Amino acid sequence: EMILAWAGVFPTRDALLARIGPPLAPYLAASIRRTDDGWTLRFDPHEVLRSEAALNGDHWDAWLAHRCPALLVRGARSRVVAGEALE
């Protein structure tokens, strides 16, 4: 859901890159385009989440209802999931 902050039009390319953040900006730099209104991504972050949900399903209820202990491992510089989501 962090990618929803990337949706919309930004006044400058640097403003959009700042919103994306330094860890991911290099990977998305080629996906930035200029429009008449400003700078935006070539894809809609909302569509990315809808596509991901359709492919993976929503398993949070199953995870949260489970009583079996689980070990979650996250790298210190992980870009896949925010630490807050794992809490």
Image (cartoon, helix red, strand yellow):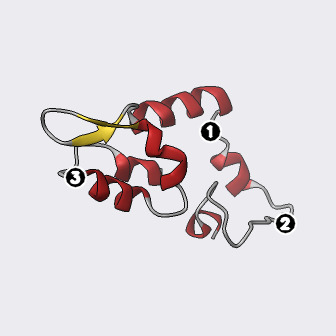
Q: Find residue 38 and report its image quarter.
A: top left
* Tag in front: 3 or 2: 3
Name the residue nearer the viewer: 33 or 79.
Answer: 33
The three-letter code of the residue at mark 3 reads Thr
Mark 1 touches mark 2? (CB < 8 Å): no
Relative height, residue 18 to residue 27 (above, below): below
Q: Residue at x 43, y 37 (%)?
A: 31
Q: Which mark sits nearer the N-terminus, 3 or 2?
A: 3
Q: Is residue 50 left or right of residue 81?
A: left
Q: Residue at x 80, y 66 (%)?
A: 73
Find residue 12 and name its label: 3
The three-letter code of the residue at mark 2 reads Leu
Name the residue nearer the viewer: 53 or 42.
Answer: 42
Name the residue nearer the viewer: 37 or 30.
Answer: 30
Q: CA distance from mark 1 to mark 3?
A: 35 Å
Relative height, residue 49 to residue 87 (above, below): above
Q: Which mark sits nearer the N-terminus, 1 or 3?
A: 3
Which residue corresponds to mark 2? 71
The three-letter code of the residue at mark 1 reads Asp
Q: Residue lying furthest left in this view?
A: 37
The percent position of residue 30, horizontal first and vertical second, equals 46, 39
Q: Residue at x 58, y 63 (%)?
A: 82
